[in-house]
Amino acid sequence: MDLFKVLGSGARFNKKRFTDDISLFEPSNKLRKTNDTSDTQMDIMQEINFFHNSKSAIDETLGVTKDKKITKDVEKDQEEESINCYNDENEDEDDQAEEEPLVKDLNSMDDVKSFRKRHRIHIYGTDIPNPFSSFDDLESKYNFQPYICKNLKNSAYEKPTPIQMQAIPIMIHGRDLMAMAPTGSGKTLAYIIPMLHDLKGPEKIGYRALIISPTRELAQQIYREFKKMAVGKKFKVCMLTKATAATQAQTPHLREKFDILISTPLRLVHAIQQDIIELKNVRHLILDEADKLLELGFLEQTDEIFAACSNVKLQKALFSATFPSSVETLANDFMKDPIRVVIGLKNAATETIKQKLLYVGQEEGKLIAVRQLIQEGFKPPVLIFVQSIERAKELFHELIYDGINVDVIHSERTKAQRDSIILNLKQGKIWVLIATELMARGMDFKGVNLVINYDFPQSVQSYIHRIGRTGRAGRSGEAVTYYTKDDAPYLKSVVNVMKESGCEVPDWMLQLKNPSRESKKRLRKKPIERKTIDTRSTYDLKKMIRKKYVSNYLLLR
């Protein structure tokens, strides 16, 4: 008598009933045929593996190699041969060994190509300046003033990053630039250094350089970096706030004393319309997080800023970790013969981030997963991203009673509150910070060990910017993305980023269908509707409402 056959005889799975659920995780059509043979072998092995204790045997039979890394060839660009998106451990060691000796001179085109290939620098354009390999070259080769090199050493910048190696020479030569590099790769310094070099010193003719940032917090960060790099020169750097705008409105002659202006778009547009700020002498215009500034929400403001910068010698540079094709097309309309620089793969995350996907079932499973993480112990600080201010508040009210130092940051908090929160996070007083989408842009939170995407990101660009808050400046980090049944149709978008970044991805995820262009567009415009984050019982909610009703009644008597 076959005991297992008897036990399983009454078990049936109604595929018709769950057709919609099954379709979410079906592989793409082109992969179905290739999987038929392996699926049959797997079914046979699983049928004889009654107690599920022979996984290694199944893997061995089917030729499955554990911890297999996925590699992909990068398309050949105008000047370079294709390279792998990442290498295995042995190749990494070889690369590090090759990078240790400094390349003093890049005399031939072969040397330049080899150098760019080794540092994964992809370039597009004409008459492209050669990269440099050491900060010592700035003084010896490009005649930089000594104070810049001294400030670099004092700030512990030992060697340039790939984006700095190529972007700085391009900007020195006055060319328009579109620069895309992973988060935490030194993009801010890549435009500060050549800008200070070109400005030479302070002049009392008004603003000569302008940096636009989508958030006030990022603008403050850029301001601090400018002040640090400008030590030794009496450059006047202004971060446009309500207070500084009012001061310049009351005393117009102060405007001429400033050299560099840093601002958010709306604040600057208001100052331009009120004739508080003049930008006719601006020679350098930088859009930091350019893809965000060229979205529909900022585009009208950005256009007005461009119109105010009337200098015929204006140099424009765009920096970001991601550039959708629509933004590239738009940028080409207002840039003059731009050079495009891409570090690594386009729209990929840095390889220092360990990325994970975690299926939580329904919305309630997310809070359970977070609390389980807290109970098991974690290494702060941790950033948790949600899709709206309301959900940020809801999650904060849930976690604040769990015995951890948690806070929340979003646009409804006052400037003083946001400054205090960021300071407390840097000082270790906050362990877990809940944030909304816009805070994922450009902010350099030092030492963030873990990023949790509590709500699934609305686009690939959003995902890259979110997880880019960890794994910065060569440090390692981890990013976990929760997903539910509602997020399943968009899962492949994140899987593709993980694969391109060199992360291990299960085969079944690689076989998922790519979301359609229409569905991705809908998701960008409107996030998925989700249940309220609230673990209180219906009885407790009714009790709270009743108590509130009684108190209001007593107040009216």
Image (cartoon, helix red, strand yellow):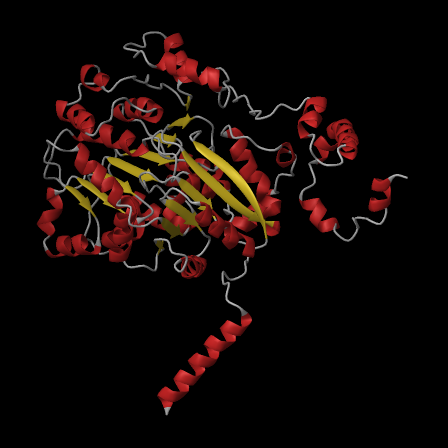
Quadrant including the N terminus = top right
Name the residue at 33% across, 16% down. Answer: 130
Residue 193 percent across, percent down from the top left: 23, 29
Residue 78 is at least partly visible in this image: no
Instruction: Describe residue 214's horizontal placement relative to residue 327 as left or right.
Output: left
The residue sitting at the bottom extreme is 557
Residue 396 quadrant:
bottom left
Residue at image location 23% in from the left, 16% down from the top: 137
Q: How many marks?
A: 0
Outermost right residue: 1
Residue 553, quarter of picture: bottom left
Q: Is residue 79 left or right of residue 495?
A: left
113 up-or-down from 532: above or below: above
Q: Position of residue 229 (x, y in %)?
A: 18, 32
In the image: residue 306, left or right of residue 513: left
User: Residue at horizontal 22%, vertical 27%?
Assistant: 156
Camera-side residue of 31 and 426: 426
Report the quarter where the C terminus lies. Answer: bottom left
Q: Residue 528, image x and y in percent?
A: 55, 54
Front-most of 128 and 526? Answer: 526
Residue 552 seen by the camera: yes
Q: Residue at x 37, y 27 (%)?
A: 337
**Coordinates of residue 387 in the picture (x, y in percent):** 46, 53
| Above or below, 287 relative to 502 | below
